[in-house]
Image (tube, grey):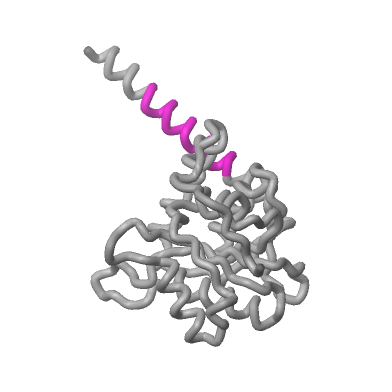
Amino acid sequence: MVKLKKVLIILVIASSLLALTVFIGLDIVIKQQTQLQLYNDIDSLPKHKVGLLLGTAKYTTNPKGGINLYYKYRIQAAVELYQAQKIDYILASGDNSKYNYNEPIEMQNDLVKAGIPRDKIYLDYAGFRTLDSVVRSQRVFGQDSITIISQPFHNQRALFIAKYKGIDAVGYNAKAVQGSYSWRTKIREKFARIKMLGDLIFNKQPKFLGDPIPIGF
């Protein structure tokens, strides 16, 4: 029995070390592969026809409530790009899987309030995951080159997917969220990157594709 316990402890330690190595190694690879496509400076950002705005919930799940800062800063970044004429259209891609939950419509409403013409905004209602949003931007909305709009950590993952799928993409970094507000998101991101790797290896496809929706015609 004592020997079996020692074996189990060794296996747990070995598995933990292996998982940690994978987490760290994948982070390093993703950052190295995407660092030249990430932009904080709007002036140096190349222009693309379409900015892919990645969705998230508008409101936090925190008991105190309030606007989700990830959402707020992404909207601000999309408006900045449009006003600087770095994009001509915004593709708002998000989750619309529940009756009373519609990320694309929320984003559209707030973009219009910020001065973006409604006819310059296209909605992707099937952007359930980052992979779905990126792949659908090409296969449904016809964009082989695109500017992705989200926080830096999210842009890295989205750009890695785009690169793997043969899409010419750059990322414009929305303002990062700091402090304890973001720690859960950062932990989830580690596991999201592992899942992304599996999805790419096994050629996971978006939940929905559908007929082409041309942008700007």
Q: Is residue 180 magenta?
A: no
**Rendered residue at 34%/72% (across/down):** 59
**Depth order, front residue of 185/204:** 204
Relative height, residue 60 to residue 113 (above, below): above
**Rendered residue at 51%/62% (across/down):** 54
Q: Is residue 134 visible?
A: no
Q: Is residue 23 magenta?
A: yes
Residue 10 is situated, as x and y percent measured from the top left of the image, at 38, 22
Which image quadrant is residue 121 in? bottom right
**Rendered residue at 22%/12% (across/down):** 1
Residue 135 is situated, as x and y percent measured from the top left of the image, at 57, 49
Q: Which residues are magenta?
A: 11-26
Q: Which quarter of the rendered picture does the C terminus lie within?
A: bottom right
Q: Is residue 16 visible?
A: yes
Residue 208 is situated, as x and y percent measured from the top left of the image, at 46, 47
**Rendered residue at 52%/54% (across/down):** 133
Residue 15 is situated, as x and y percent measured from the top left of the image, at 42, 28
Relative height, residue 149 to residue 81 (above, below): above
Magenta stretch: helix, strand or loop mostly? helix
In this image, 71 relative to 158: left or right?
Answer: left
Relative height, residue 48 to residue 189 (above, below): below
